[in-house]
Amino acid sequence: MRRFTEGFYGYAVALFVCLGAAGLFLLVTPQSSGEHIPKLNYSITVANFSRTVPYQVWAPSKDPAGWVPNSNKIATGEGGAQVLHLGYATAKREHAVIIQSDEKPAGGFANRMANSDKVVGTEQINGRAWERRFREDKNQRTLVLPLPDVTVVVTGTADWPELTEIVTVLQQRPKPTD
């Protein structure tokens, strides 16, 4: 009599045992059916950025309903200027990012962040005139607020109403006192 592990039948049984174990593992392992967008707190990044720049930083007073802050960083722009990025997944699950810097020339900074130098209109939001820019091939909409001491850019694949929604909650934060 042949041993159980020899021949075709032994291999077939071993294969079915392995497949059964894998199937059992998949049955008892919890499966995630919902989306998972990592939520990152940007308050420390904003506070650190505020300490390094000579102007009041613009940041959301609150996150719009359904929006998830999912990225934030401080980068170095042209001429050594500090650049703050606050990224979001919007309620419609598009992308939007708030970017600001005192980089000079301000127009060059805004053009790079918007991927466009073409202003297609303006929009009054909270009493300020924001430039509208649109780059069709990237499906990128941008609102730009050029101020004397800082340029604020809100850009992404979000539609105009969503970009306006995040702009309405932007506020200048007071400079921290150390």
Image (spheres, grey):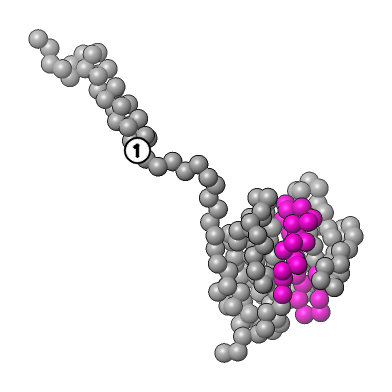
Q: Nearer the viewer, residue 20 or 131?
A: 20
Q: Quadrant of residue 75?
A: bottom right
Whether residue 115 is visible here, answered yes or no, is no
Q: Quadrant of the C terminus?
A: bottom right
**Residue bearing mark 1:** 28
Q: Visible in this render: residue 139?
A: yes
- Report x, y in % for residue 102: 73, 76
The residue at the point 32 percent across, 26 percent down is: 19
Q: Relative to 17, does residue 69 appear above or below in the rendering?
A: below
Q: Position of residue 124 (x, y in %)?
A: 86, 67
Residue 7 point in image, percent of width and height: 21, 13
Q: Image quadrant for the N terminus?
A: top left
Label 1 crowding class (10 Å Cα cut-off): few <14, some 14-19, many 20+? few
Q: Residue at x 37, y 35 (%)?
A: 26
Left-right relation of 165 to 17:
right
The residue positioned farthest toward the left in the image shown: 1
Image vertical order of residue 60 relative to residue 121, above or below: below
Chain part drawn in magenta? 145-171
Compared to residue 103, the image places residue 90 above or below, namely above
